[in-house]
Image (spheres, rainbow, N blue to C red):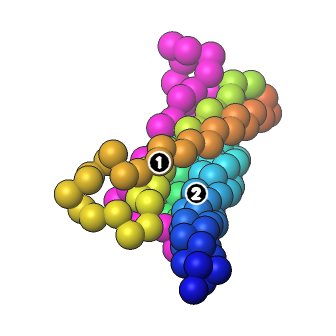
């Protein structure tokens, strides 16, 4: 009887730990993948509006692939060099994806205390031969 009790006391937390870590790892992979694809997609977009739509699409696709909730994620776009418009020739685009991963079996009352923040970021260069400016004018 003691063997079964000790086995359950050790096994249940171990299983919970494995499930929780797999959820966190899925979010890490989704954040990194979404950031890389979003940065590349924006850098190759013909204009700012299309680029931002592609960033949202990349985030939604990555979250759907890993079965994560879209409402727990956000994307931040930063263009370099600072002060110039996004998509400037020979510039770069940096995307940061933040995901708040809710731990399994945590009640809603706990709120964000029962969640783990995960982020991924990537930077992609904009081609110096990009002709966005000539299309607009």
Is 72 magenta? The answer is yes
x, y percent for residue 128? 78, 29
Q: Residue at x 27, y 64 (%)?
A: 107
Give 80 or 11, whichever is nearer the viewer: 11
84 up-or-down from 108: above or below: above
Q: Are marks 1 and 2 in contact (CB under 8 Å)?
A: yes
Give 112 or 126, whichever is nearer the viewer: 112
Residue 85 appears in the figure? yes
Q: Residue at x 26, y 52 (%)?
A: 111
Looking at the image, residue 83 sits to the left or right of residue 111; the answer is: right
x, y percent for residue 37? 67, 53
Q: Which mark is residue 116?
A: 1
Q: Residue at x 63, y 52 (%)?
A: 28
x, y percent for residue 114? 36, 52
**Which portion, as a residue range, is magenta?**
67-89
Residue 105 figure quarter: bottom left
Ranked by sequence position, the earlier of labels 1 and 2 is 2
x, y percent for residue 56? 48, 56
Element carrying mark 2: helix
Looking at the image, residue 111 sits to the left or right of residue 86; the answer is: left
Q: Residue at x 64, y 80 (%)?
A: 3
Residue 51 appears in the figure? no
Element carrying mark 1: strand
Is 32 magenta? The answer is no
Q: Which mark is residue 24?
A: 2
5 up-or-down from 84: above or below: below
Q: CA distance from mark 1 to mark 2?
A: 7 Å
């Amino acid at each position: 009887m003691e063997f079964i009790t000790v086995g359950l006391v050790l096994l249940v937390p171990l299983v919970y730990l494995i499930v929780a870590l797999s959820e966190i790892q899925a979010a890490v992979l989704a954040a990194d993948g979404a950031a890389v694809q979003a940065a590349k997609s924006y850098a190759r977009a013909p204009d700012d509006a299309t680029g931002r739509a592609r960033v949202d699409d990349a985030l939604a696709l990555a979250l759907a692939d890993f079965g994560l909730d879209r409402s727990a994620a956000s994307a931040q776009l930063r263009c370099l060099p600072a002060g110039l418009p996004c998509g400037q020739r020979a510039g770069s685009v940096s995307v940061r994806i933040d995901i708040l991963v809710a731990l399994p079996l945590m009640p809603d009352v706990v709120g964000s205390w029962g969640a783990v923040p995960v982020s991924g970021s990537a930077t992609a260069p904009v081609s110096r031969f990009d002709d966005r400016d000539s299309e607009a004018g």
